[in-house]
Amino acid sequence: MRATLTLLAFLASQIVIAQQQVHRQRGSQFIVQVGQEAPRFSFITSDGDTLDSDLLHGQVVLIDFAASWCPFTPAQMEDHQNAFWQKYSGNPAFSMFTICEDFPQDRHYFNNIAKEAGVTSPIVYDDKEELYQLFVTPNGSVTRSMIIAPDWSIAYLQDKHTRRGMRALRRTLRHLLRDAQ
């Protein structure tokens, strides 16, 4: 009996250690860090427009990463459209776009989610995860957001869509856009 209890205690401690390691890994899935210069990029949006970091330099840029298979994507897209795109899209100091991580054959699922969420901000289809991997570790979770400041430094990183994260995004955007005016 004592050996069984000892074994159970050992196994429980190993589970706790494994959970802590997973939590640490999930918390550090961004390759970039707040304060460092954001990577440069150039891609074509779903509307055929060129999205180039050199053209965005000097603006506050909100980037959302999303996929149709992620359960957090619909809420994030709808919340960000309502809270940020509708409010700031007319501001020349603001840009926002969503990077879609779906395979080409699954785009119709993503497009349906975007349509239901009322998305009118630009979408970039990142089929080969080239843009995603500039910012996030391979196999990192998808639903996340980041803000790039006008000086092209990383101003904010958010690992998943939460109410608390929305408040922090709102504060960061408001502060950066006030300073950009």
Image (tube, rainbow, N blue to C red):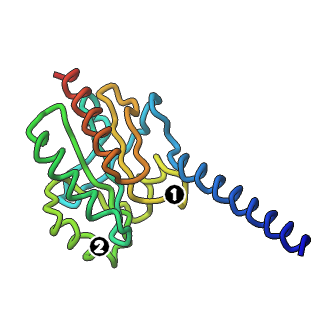
Estimate the x, y position of residue 34 in percent, counting from the top left.
45, 33
Q: Is residue 145 left or right of residue 31?
A: left
Towards the viewer: 129 or 143? 143
Amino acid type indicated by mark 2:
Arg
Towards the viewer: 178 or 39? 178
User: Is 152 placed above or below 74 here?
Assistant: above
Looking at this view, name the residue that lies furthest to the left.
90
User: Is 83 placed above or below 7 here?
Assistant: above
Residue at image location 29% in from the left, 31% down from the top: 57
Quadrant of the rendering where the N terminus is positioned:
bottom right
User: Is 129 placed above or below 64 here?
Assistant: below
Looking at this view, name the residue that lies furthest to the front.
1
Residue at image location 26% in from the left, 65% down from the top: 74
Q: Which residue is the site of mark 1?
A: 140
Residue 107: which disc? 2
Local packing at callout 2 (Cα closer than 10 Å; few below 14, some 14-19, many 20+) is some
User: Is 142 placed above or below 8 here?
Assistant: above
Residue at image location 37% in from the left, 44% down from the top: 41
Q: Secondary structure at mark 1?
A: loop
Quadrant of the rendering where the C terminus is positioned:
top left
Distance between the alpha carbons at the discs numbered 1 and 2: 20 Å
Amino acid type indicated by mark 1:
Gly
Residue 121: which disc? none
Estimate the x, y position of residue 138 in percent, counting from the top left.
55, 57
Estimate the x, y position of residue 114 in percent, counting from the top left.
20, 65
Residue at image location 26% in from the left, 27% down from the top: 176
Nearer the viewer's eye, disc 1 or disc 2?
Answer: 1
